[in-house]
Amino acid sequence: FEESLLAKKRKLNSISVYLRTLRAIYNQAIKDKIALESMYPFKEVKIKNEVTSKRAISKEDIIKIKKLDLEPGSELDKARDYFLFSFNMRGMSFVDMAFLKNSDIIDGRLQYARKKTGQKISIKITPEAEAIIKKHSYSNSPEDFIFKIIDRKGKEYLDYRNALRLTNKKLRLIGEMAKCSIRVSTYVSRHSWSTIEKRAGVST
């Protein structure tokens, strides 16, 4: 099973999750007397992990990004706004940002369902996030998207992917300009928010 996953170019940590899940199921099957302990397949299996690269930047780096002198309305300026909006909204994923609609703003909060899991989320809109929304607002219609990331009906996912690629390209430049310790991307805003909050003593 491990060799098959490696052949499919799965990462070691992903394989580790699959194997640990399979092991947990087998252990439960032994407890439920469905499987035999004598045929336990994990006796000599070592589940490997690898250390992942750092994906968070410091609060100081976030401030440096905010203070960069970028041309208003440029693609760099837009990419920074998306990064900071995500950071303000508890590390909101780019796909969720892309599909946000004006109707998702209710009583000063963003209320939406995560694209990846369907989980319902409600987050208070910070003053900084509100300023970014106002800056990029192009329509008052409840059914229109908050950000002009998706532009074509029927090609929403393609528009989102293209915008994600361009945003990450610009964020890499922004990270270099701000002299951040790692390569900056939309994903970095998610990890940075959770890391900074955890260090500040906020419970998981």
Image (cartoon, grey):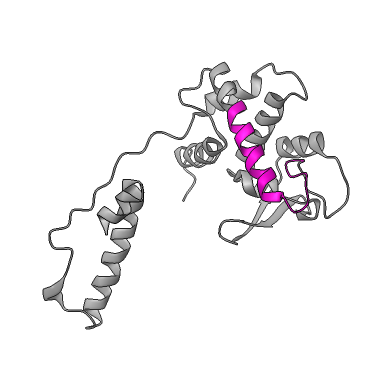
Residue 5, horizontal then vertical, whole percent? 32, 54
Relative to residue 141, is residue 81 depicted above or below? above
Residue situated in front as seen by the camera: 59 or 16: 16
Q: Quadrant of the N terminus?
A: bottom left
Residue drawn at point x = 48 percent, y = 38 percent: 200
Left or right placement of residue 54 versus residue 107 in this view: left
Residue segment shown in magenta: 148-170
Left or right placement of residue 40 versus residue 196 in this view: left
Q: Is residue 150 magenta?
A: yes
Main SS class of the magenta portion in the image: helix
- Name the image quarter holding residue 133: top right
Residue drawn at point x = 24 percent, y = 48 percent: 48
Relative to residue 122, is residue 159 depicted above or below? above
Left or right placement of residue 74 versus residue 39 in this view: right
Residue situated in front as seen by the camera: 8 or 185: 8
Relative to residue 124, is residue 181 depicted above or below? above
- Name the image quarter holding residue 70: top right
